[in-house]
Amino acid sequence: MDFTFNDEQQQFADALRRYLDKSYGFEARQAIVRTEAGVSDAHWTAFTELGLTALPVPEAQGGFNGSPIDMLVVMQELGRALVVEPYWATAVGIEALRLAGTGQGEDASLLERAAQGEIKLAVAFHEPHARYDLFEVDTVANGQGNQQTLTGTKSVVLHGAQADHWIVPARLNGEIALFVVARDAAGVKVTDYRTIDGQRAATFEFDGTPARQLAGKHSGAAALEHIADYGTVLLCAEAVGVLDALNHATGEYTKTRQQFGQPIARFQALQHRMVEMLIHAEQARSITYLAAVRYTSADANERRRAVSAAKARVGQAARFVGQQAVQLHGGMGVTNEVAAAHLFKRLAIIETTLGDVDHHLARFAALPGFVSTEA
C-alpha cells in the first residue's frame, strides 16, 4: 500500500508548515494559551484563508470534500506546532453534520458557514461517570418532530465554549439520537476551563434547552460511533506530528547538553534510546495512515479494527517517547520553559481522549475474528 502524499497534499502541508513556522512559534502559542479566550481569532481567519476550514466540507456546501488522508496531512502539521485553535473540534462537528444531517436546509447552512470559517462546531461525546463508553447517555430529549428540548450534562467537551453550535447525543424514546444546539440557546450553563495541555474544554448543563434533531439516514448510535472514529483518526494524526516534534526537540537538546566534557548525544546508550523513540514514532505513523484509509471502508468492523489498533499503538508510542524525552531533557523536561514538556502533555491528553490504550485494546479484542494467543 502506497502512503506517499500526492503533489497537492504535499504542497498543502508545506504551505501550512511555512505559516505555522513563521506565525505560530512556541512563544506565540504560549501567549495565546495565556489569554482569557485561549484561542486566536486572527489565526482562525488565517486557517480559513489557507482553506483548512473548507477542507472537510462536502463540495455541495462550498468545501473541498477532503478525504481522511487530506485531513491527516493537516493534523500532523497542527500537531507539530501544538496548535490550540478549535480545528479538531470543528472538523469532527463537520463530519457529524455530514454523516447524520440531511445535507439540506439548516444542515447545509451550517456546513457552508463552517467552510467559510464563520462558525465553529463541537461534539459533546461524553457524560460524567461514563468513562469512554459512547453509549452511556443519560441526557434525554423531549418534544415533537425535529424541535426538542434537552436535559442532562455533558463533560469535557473539547473547545465547547468556543463553538457556536454543538452536536449533542441524547436519548429520544430510549434510543440515541443526535441534536444540534446553538450556543446562545436558553437553559444551558457552560463552564469553560483550560486543560493541562493548554487546550480548552467545557461542561454543559442542559435544562430544557431547545435543540434540533439531525434527521439524516444515519443519525443514531452507529453514527455517533462513526463520528468518534473519525475524531480518533484525526487525534492519531495529530499525535504523529507531536511525536515528530518531540523527537526533533530531544535530538537538538542532546546536542547541547554537556556531560563529561561532551554532548550527551555522543553517548551510544542514549543514541540507542533515541533510535527506539524514532521507531515508535514510525510505527505510530504507519498504523495511523492505515486507519485513515480504512475509515472509509464499507465494513464497519474493518473500520473499528483499524481505528482501535491505531489509537492503541499511538498511545503506547506517546507514553514511551514522552517519558524518554523528559528523561533525556533532565530537569528541564518538566518545566514550562521548554516545548518538550508541553508536547508530552499534549500526547498524554490525546492518549486519554476518545478512549485510552486499554479501552481500544478491549474494543479490538471484542471484534469478530479476533483470536487470542493464550492457551
Image (cartoon, helix red, strand yellow):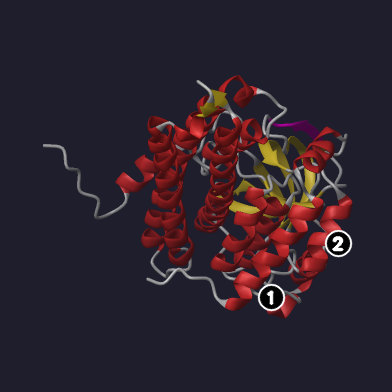
> What's under tag 1, amino acid-wise?
Phe
Residue position for label 2: 118
| Mark 2–mark 1 distance (CA, rounded to whole Å) | 16 Å
Q: Residues within 10 Å of mark 2 (few under 14, many from 20)?
A: some
Q: Can residue 193 be found in the magenta stretch? A: yes
Mark 2: secondary structure:
loop
Classify residue 358 by image quadrant. top left
Among all residues in the image, which is located at the extreme bottom?
60
Instruction: Report x, y in % for residue 11.
Output: 66, 72
Q: From the viewer's side, name the closer residue of 196 and 169.
A: 196
Q: Which mark is residue 64?
A: 1
Q: Residues within 10 Å of mark 1 (few under 14, many from 20)?
A: some
Residue 22 left/right relative to 196: right
Q: Can residue 325 be found in the magenta stretch? A: no
Question: What residue do we see at 70% from left, 47% from top?
Answer: 142
Q: From the viewer's side, name the closer residue of 261 and 146.
A: 261
Instruction: Report x, y in % for residue 319.
Output: 47, 34
Instruction: Report x, y in % for residue 202.
Output: 74, 36
* Contact (Cβ within 8 Å) of mark 2 with mark 1: no
- Number of labelled discs? 2
Q: Is residue 113 visible?
A: no
Mark 1: secondary structure:
loop
Q: Is residue 177 above or below residue 359?
A: below
What's the magenta region?
A: 189-195
Q: Is residue 54 above or below residue 362?
A: below
Quadrant, the C terminus: top left
The secondary structure that most of the magenta stretch takes on is strand
Q: From the viewer's side, name the closer residue of 28 and 348.
A: 28
Q: Of label 2 and label 1, which has the lower sequence position?
A: 1
> What's under tag 2, amino acid-wise?
Glu
Residue 305 left/right relative to 265: left
Question: What residue do we see at 43% from left, 68% from top?
Answer: 297
